[in-house]
Amino acid sequence: MGRLKSTLARMCDKHELLEKYDRDSRTIYKKELLNKYMTPVFWELSTIFHTTLS
């Protein structure tokens, strides 16, 4: 009975770790997407802004 419990506990831990990893990787992915697409847009906007100001 003890072995079954420890195996179940390990499986639960692994599952939680996987879920946490999945959540983390999703947020990292979102951040990377944001950086990838927002950086050029941001630079474009700041350039336009600077040229209109000067």
Image (cartoon, rainbow, N blue to C red):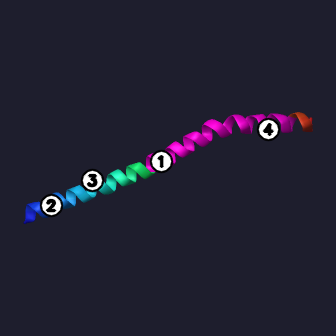
Q: CA distance from mark 4 to mark 3?
A: 46 Å
- Label 2 sits on a secondary structure element that is helix
Query: Which residue, given by chain and number where applicable, does mark 3 sit on?
Result: 14
Are discs 1 and 3 less than 8 Å apart at CB?
no
Which comes before the other along the chain, label 1 or label 3?
A: 3
Q: CA distance from mark 2 to mark 4?
A: 57 Å
Nearest the eye: 9 or 50 = 9
- Label 1 sits on a secondary structure element that is helix
Which comes before the other along the chain, label 2 or label 1?
A: 2
Query: Which residue, given by chain and number where applicable, does mark 4 sit on?
Result: 46
Q: Residue at x 45, y 46 (%)?
A: 25
Q: Residue at x 84, y 35 (%)?
A: 48
**Residue 16 position in % (x across, y down):** 32, 57
Q: CA distance from mark 1 to mark 3?
A: 18 Å
Q: Residue furthest bottom?
A: 1
- Residue 36 belongs to the span the image colors magenta: yes
Query: Which residue, given by chain and number where applicable, does mark 1 sit on?
Result: 26
Q: Is residue 2 left or right of residue 20?
A: left
Quadrant location of the N terminus? Answer: bottom left
Q: Residue at x 37, y 54 (%)?
A: 19
Q: Which residues are magenta?
A: 24-50
Q: Main secondary structure of the magenta part?
A: helix
**Disc 4 versus disc 3: nearer the observer:** 3
- Label 3 sits on a secondary structure element that is helix
Q: Residue furthest left?
A: 1
Q: Quarter of the image holding residue 7?
A: bottom left
